[in-house]
Image (cartoon, rainbow, N blue to C red):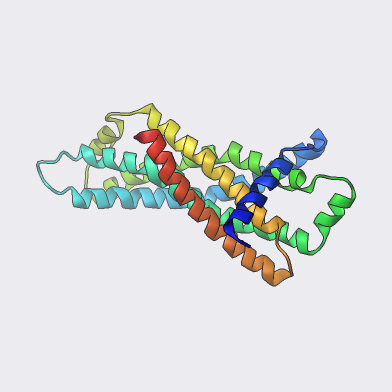
Amino acid sequence: MNYFEHIGKYFMMLTQVFRKPQRSRVFREALSREIEVLGLKSLGIIAFISFFIGGVIALQTALNLNNPLIPQSLIGFAAKRSIILEFAPTFCSIILAGKVGSYITSSIGTMRVTEQIDALEVMGINSLNYLVLPKIIATLFFYPFLISLGMILGIFGGWISGTMTGIFSGVDYIEGVQMDFDPYLIMYSLIKTLIFAFIIATVPSYHGYYVKGGSLEVGKASTQSVVWTIVLIVIANYFLTQMLLT
């Protein structure tokens, strides 16, 4: 199957996802379940990685700005920009693509190979709407919160790394974080997060829904979905940066 056929099937899938909604009670139950599985269970890994990567960014910035003529406040400024612009929205989304994407593909793919999706269709249920739409809304609703948490913990981790190692002053770091604050950069990051969240929810769902074969094929589809999700995130990041920052 060529790429154009995959693209066509993907957009045809999206038209079915937003058609014929289920009963509100069933949808609310599915949505709350997806928020817990796709969002709340990702809090730990995002918090852990954001804190330590923020510390690494601050330390590497400090070690490369060792000229006495350069004020130490630039360490906090550079770390803040790096975390807000790229690390939090892009790097964390790539991590979520690996964790959440493989789960979505394997869960939907298992339902496909065990004929549970066929049973839903026989009962007159729009299986794509039932399985995919709650995942889209859950990621669009919860991932901006996750990325915002990643920004905060990343900047905080940079401050902790400076105060514990003594490589730079925590006061100067905070001064740099407060320097030249631009709220549009936060909006830019959250816009990227929403686009990435949509990709994370839909691309693995596509690979899982159209998988054919048995458990081995489900495993291969999970790997492919993670790879393609990351590729699309990187491509979307390039075009979004070009459109929103230039």
Q: Quadrant of the image for the N terminus?
A: bottom right
Q: Evaluate whether residue 178 shows in this view.
A: yes
Q: Quadrant of residue 139?
A: top right
Q: Is residue 21 above or below residue 201?
A: above
* Residue 150 locus on image (x, y percent): 45, 43
Residue name at image x 14 percent, y 41 percent: 70
Q: Evaluate whether residue 95 shows in this view.
A: no
**In the displayed structure image, the side of residue 170 where residue 47 appears, left or right:** right
Q: Quadrant of the image for the C terminus?
A: top left
Q: Which sits in the foreground, 110 or 149?
A: 110
Outermost left residue = 69
Residue name at image x 52 percent, y 44 percent: 196
* Count of marks overlaid on the render: 0
Q: Which sits in the foreground, 244 or 95?
A: 244
**In the displayed structure image, the side of residue 154 where residue 196 appears, left or right:** right
* Residue 174 locus on image (x, y percent): 29, 35
* Residue 126 locus on image (x, y percent): 80, 45
* Residue 49 locus on image (x, y percent): 44, 52
Q: Quadrant of residue 168?
A: top left
Outermost right residue = 123
Outermost bottom residue = 216
Residue name at image x 71 percent, y 69 percent: 215
Q: Which sits in the foreground, 22 or 15?
A: 15
